[in-house]
Image: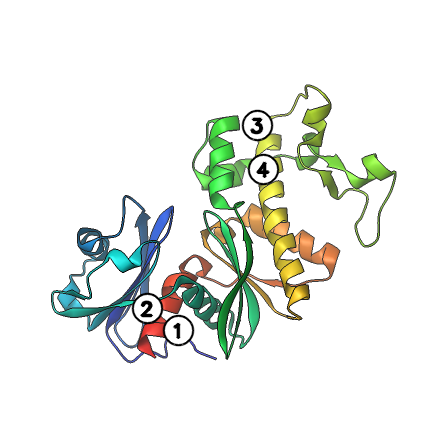
């Protein structure tokens, strides 16, 4: 197992995500984390800009680790500092295990989309994934509610009920099925398919959160079963939202699974890149 502080270097890792660029810096004893919105393709200017956001320049560190989209576009040296290009699957797996404090797990990265990684001492491999993620929540939030701030959607969702737009198992089948209680979602937005509904913005936000969170959690559960894995770790900035975490908890309850959602999970990929580059 690799803990985030097992790094005896002054170094920085940058994860170039679709929505956020996440940064983890260590001075050899402690970590600092920050993020900025992703803009354009990774290049040397972007590296300098995201470091400057944390009051750093390249010469402040021994080396720079990069992961995420189009990392290979970056030079091998910036101001004489090596740039280590870390495979994203490896970074997700390594970071998820470290933050959860386990040696083996299904690590599900819930970012703009969702990637599911089987990670252990032998390494990390991509198992499955989905286009449903934080980008889905924000995109549909814009379309249906005119809201693009995920934290605003999260707060609004906590004030509504998903059943205002969803159909439940009880309504479709007349009762529970297996381990799923009657009030479990059977059809996301199914009530809307039957005709106009008088749903509040809060109900719409709740239904969006319910759909996105359920898809991610169920994919993670199925991947864990398929790989005979007992631990399910969910990371990525989408897991920062309390309403999403509550959806994960309910899905876990229904399917007899426990999800670990570690602190600073949004920085798991950058943390994993830092650990991988450190050796």
In front here: 57 or 39? 39
C-alpha distance separating marks 2 and 3: 39 Å
Res. 4 mark: 1
Real-space Cα distance between discs 2 and 1? 8 Å
As drawn, 100 above or below 180: below
Q: Which residue is mark 4?
A: 208
Mark 3 → mark 4, Cα distance in angstroms: 11 Å
The answer to which of marks 2 and 1 sits earlier in the sequence is 1
Q: Nearer the viewer, residue 242 or 59?
A: 59
Residue 26 in the image: state x and y as whole percent: 28, 70
Residue sitting at x 62%, y 48%: 215
Q: Nearer the viewer, mark 2 or mark 4?
A: 4
Is the residue under label 1 in contact with that under label 2 (CB below 8 Å)? Answer: yes
Q: Which mark is residue 201?
A: 3
Tell me the number on the disc at residue 31: 2
Do labels 1 and 3 touch, CB within 8 Å? no
């Amino acid at each position: 197992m690799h803990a985030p502080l097992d790094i005896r270097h002054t170094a920085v890792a940058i994860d170039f995500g679709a929505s956020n660029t996440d940064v983890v810096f260590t001075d050899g004893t402690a970590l600092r984390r920050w993020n900025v919105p992703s803009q354009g393709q990774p290049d040397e200017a972007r590296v300098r800009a995201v470091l400057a956001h944390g009051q750093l320049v390249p010469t402040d560190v021994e080396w720079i680790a990069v992961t995420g989209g189009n990392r290979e576009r970056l030079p091998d040296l910036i101001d004489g500092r090596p740039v280590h290009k870390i495979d994203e699957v490896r970074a997700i797996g390594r970071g998820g295990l470290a933050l959860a404090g386990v040696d083996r797990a299904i690590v599900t990265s819930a970012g703009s989309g969702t990637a599911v990684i089987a990670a252990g001492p032998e390494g990390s491999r991509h198992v499955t994934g989905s286009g449903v993620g934080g980008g889905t929540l924000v995109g549909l939030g814009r379309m249906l509610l005119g809201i693009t701030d995920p934290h605003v959607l999260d707060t609004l969702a906590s004030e509504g009920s998903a059943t205002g737009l969803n159909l439940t198992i009880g309504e479709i089948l007349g009762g529970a099925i297996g381990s799923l209680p009657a009030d479990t979602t059977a059809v996301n937005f199914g009530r809307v398919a039957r005709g106009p509904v008088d749903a509040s913005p809060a109900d719409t936000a709740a239904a969006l959160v319910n759909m996105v969170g359920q898809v991610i959690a169920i994919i993670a559960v199925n991947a864990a079963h398929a790989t005979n894995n007992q631990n399910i770790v969910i990371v990525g900035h989408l897991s920062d939202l309390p309403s999403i975490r509550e959806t994960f908890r309910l899905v876990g309850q229904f399917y007899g699974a426990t999800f670990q959602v570690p602190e600073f999970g949004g920085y798991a990929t950058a943390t994993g890149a830092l650990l991988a580059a450190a050796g």
